[in-house]
Amino acid sequence: MDKAQLPFLSASDLSRLIEKKEVSPVEATEAYLDRIDSLDFKFNSYITVMREQAMEAARNAEAAIVNGDHLGPMHGVPVAVKDQFWSKGVRSTGGSRFLADDVPNEDATVIANLKKAGAIVLGKTNLTEFAVTGFSHRFSIPRNPWDLQKYTGGSSSGSGAATAAFLCASSLGEDTGGSIRFPATWCGLVGLRPSWGRVSRYGVMRGVWTMDTVGPISRTVEDAAITLGAIAGQDPKDQHSWKIPVPDYRSALTGDIRGLRIGVITEQLNSDLVENETREAVVKAIAVLGELGATVEDVSLPLTITASVASSVLLAVEPAFEHREWVKERIHDYGHDVRIQQLVGSIMPAQAYYKAQKLRTMLRDQVQEALAKYDVLVLPTCGRPAQDIQDDPAITSKETASRLPYLLTRLFNLASSPAASVPCGFSADGLPIGLQIGSRPGGDELILKVAHAYEQATPWHNQRPPEA
């Protein structure tokens, strides 16, 4: 096979060829590095490319596989990781100039786990500053492979751009309020926020510690399943990680969802924040799930319309406290969006934080009560396709105080539930639209099962971005 074509394989297909020794990890890694060198100037997806480390890892993977020591489905597969995670001997910026030259002396557990699984880490991907906003970048702005004038979505913006542009086989993002699913939907990818506690967060720069979650951004559901399998598991360095075995997520991808119960959250689907063509695409996707044998019913969850408010309070207060010394001494070194957010979080009354936590508890109870009846809940991931890249706007009104009112991901973070976005169509302008699927804590396999069945019944995952 022509080496230049290897990046266009799914991670799973590449994995199978590597296991059969029909493709070398060295060939695959060289092919991805060549694409990064020749194309990433358009996408700004990487902050740091780890060429020497990647090639050394690829040579080691090749030698091991030749000797019959194949470690599993990620062995020899080139991946990218969000620059929110510590990487030993490699700068880890958090997307901020505060840490532009910070070099950790150990890997975050998710990176260590990728290496144990034999994956090849190509580099550290771009992100919004400290991963606490959707748009504010301090290095370069990642651009969407579906339209270079559009945002990728954040905060895992570089992981979305790199995966969609075939500059890595799969990638890792981090999701506190939607930062995996947001770039997944705008870049036409599969993004999974796993159950809170399923994946260690040791070595992950903190946003909101009760909501931060690391997970895959991939081109197919199977790719997301094998990526999650490589990073999940109990970690003594993270006392909140689950002490239960990691299942074979790929075994859940049977294509059979007959008899599953699916609830459609009416407040989210019919919200004024959802544009008509997005709603129409999601309604058609839900119909496909019914045709595949699932029982589909509407469900009313009134408190979900408050998720954005509660999440915004937590995302303002907790990072501002975490960065309190920098906020006092270096506030003007933050980018526009983050500077405003840190200032607001610093003066937020304790009553507001308390009310947000109380509202979170009520919302979580409502979501989990629904999930006692339904296997999964579905809704749009975002109310609109990718928007134009623009300068930070002046905040002159309630309407311009937030650029993310149409992002419908936050209810699952507040509910400590897993959720995924899977492509479900395109706008009239050729921009991707995403279907969001959420389940109860521990329901990651159910989400992957439903997402995979839908993916295999539809053509969307086979589309290639015009700029890639």
Image: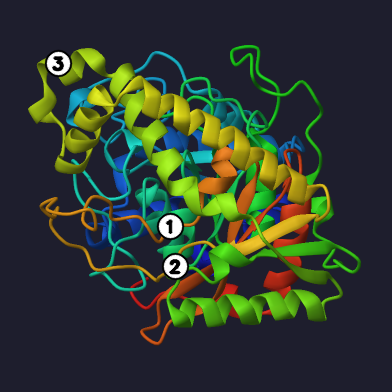
Q: Are marks 2 and 1 in contact (CB under 8 Å)?
A: yes
Where does label 3 land, which residue? 328
SS for callout 3: helix
Circle 2 SS class: loop
Separation of marks 2 and 1 at Cα, in angstroms: 6 Å
**Cβ–Cβ under 8 Å for marks 2 and 3:** no
> Residue at point 24% right, 68% down?
388
Position of residue 212 relative to residue 413, above or below, is above
Residue 114 falls left or right of residue 392:
right
**Residue 423 x %, y %:** 56, 69
Residue 163: where, in percent of width, then height?
A: 46, 57
Amino acid beneath label 3: Lys
The answer to whether any part of residue 251 appears in the image is yes
Quadrant where the N terminus sits is bottom right
Residue at the bottom extreme, as displayed: 428
* x and y, in percent, of residue 143 in the image: 28, 61
Q: Which residue is mark 2?
A: 383
Indicate the secondary structure of the residue bearing disc 1: loop
| Amino acid type at mark 2 | Gly
Q: Name the mark on residue 407.
A: 1
Separation (CA) of disc 3 from disc 1: 31 Å
